[in-house]
Image (spheres, rainbow, N blue to C red):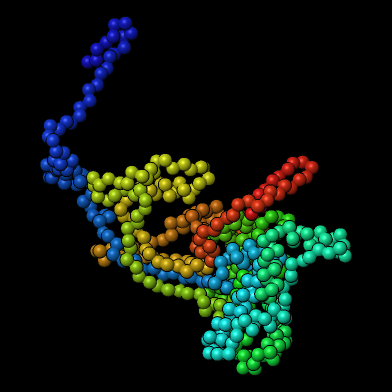
Amino acid sequence: MPRIDMLSCMPFRAWNRLEPRTRDNEFDKELECGVHDALWMLTRQWQMGEMQAEDTGSAIFAKVKMVSTPVTKYKTANGPVTPFDHSMPFEQKIETINTEKDYQAFIESGFMLLSALENAANDLGVGDFDRNAYRVRLQQLFPLTARPAISGADSRDSIIAKANVLANPALSELMVMGSDFYFNGSEVYANTNTPAALAAFKGTLTATFSAGHGTLIDNGINEFRSWYKSVYDLPPADELAWIPSQLEYSCACALPQQDGKNLVLNAKEYYSGDLDWYNFDVSKDEVITSEFGNATADETALVKEELFTKIPVEARFAGAPNSRWWQFENGSIDLGNIKAEKTDLSKMITTEYALMYGNDWLLIPYTVPVGTLCEIKGIAVTDVFGQVNFVEAANQGETNNWAAWGMFNLSVADAYASRNIPTDTRTFIPPATVKTLNGDALEEVRFCNRLNVKSGVGR
């Protein structure tokens, strides 16, 4: 019985803590955690139901059926429907803004034209090609503006314009070098944009050098125009994806389906600078979908349906508990120090998975090309006992309605605001850049009205 305090009539409780203490100099025996009663361990496992062999079968291989379709067409907010080129990232197509070419761009494009002509001459084995002679001739046809000189006869506006150029020493020195040794490559590109203009340009050069240089000029101009188009030839202002009144981008892309129709994904309010799958919604707007129309037979043939078999591997991540007993984990990972807000659903799900981790989580390695929409029809897993289990999607079931949420689900944007719309559980991997580098802020823009002031930083 506990001892009673006479003054407070409260019982006085005391505890003793028992701690093991070794008297040996070596700790090998104490740390090995040896089992001295193996029969007792087996009976306790039997009592806990661990000998029912319910989950002892290991997965040996998995068979997956997948349907994937690539992006074939896209359009900007103001532009027409255009075939999609997978050699360029989506951000370059969407975020491009046509700006005025500077003096350095004129010289660089001229240098690239001469290099393209020289490459064509080497490929064709033209021995009488003279790069310096071509440079002189093109300098006569498309000269660069020389550094201005102020004279007493200049008007006030002319003096101010020339002074602005002369006040920039780097530009002035570049203009001296450019006008003496190079030509305007942008003018060459602008004067070869039609078959008639290209034929006239070719005739001028062949008349100067040799008629046998015709193939050389054709190949060089084609290589030069391809380079210039990928670097400098941006869409006109009326075809840009930028919407100034909303300060955001807007674009849409189409993916062919097996039924011959196009699935349209619309990024209506994209402004973050990193284009990813969550910026796209499945569009039900007939105005947008009608612009893309149905998929052609060649586009429908791009839909890929495959059945492949893979060997599942154990899922591992930084800080994961080790599967072996008494093997210490990496102390640099602190899963208990994760800070998540109420809206950080993906972070909380990932944390829950890490804290409830077991060594029976498996991965099926498979590489999916970018710019595709993938749908897994089903996964059949075979274990070592020969039993086959069909794995369904985790976010399928009773919650597959307008309110369902999934990690990589695509929202369905209905123009008629229907509420009970099933979510699209397919996975879209946009052809976007993995990592972008943002420069320092160049200017600060303030938008003022009668009520308040909003500020933003431009890059």
Q: From the viewer's side, name the closer residue of 204 and 200.
A: 204
Q: Residue at x 38, y 64 (%)?
A: 365
Is 423 on the left-hand or right-hand side of 76? Answer: left
Q: Residue at x 31, y 9 (%)?
A: 9
Give the quarter of the figure containing the C terminus: bottom right
Closest to the observer, 341 or 188: 188
Q: Nearer the viewer, residue 214 or 164?
A: 164
Residue 128: x, y in percent?
58, 90
Q: Quadrant of residue 422?
A: bottom right
Q: Residue furthest top?
A: 7
* Residue 206, placed above or below residue 414: below
Instruction: Name the foreground residue: 190 vs 118.
Output: 118
Q: Is the N terminus in the top left, top right, bottom left or bottom right quadrant?
A: top left
Instruction: Residue 199: tell me if it is visible.
Output: no
Q: Can you name the residue that lies furthest to the front here?
A: 152
Above or below, comparing residue 256 to residue 282 in the picture: below
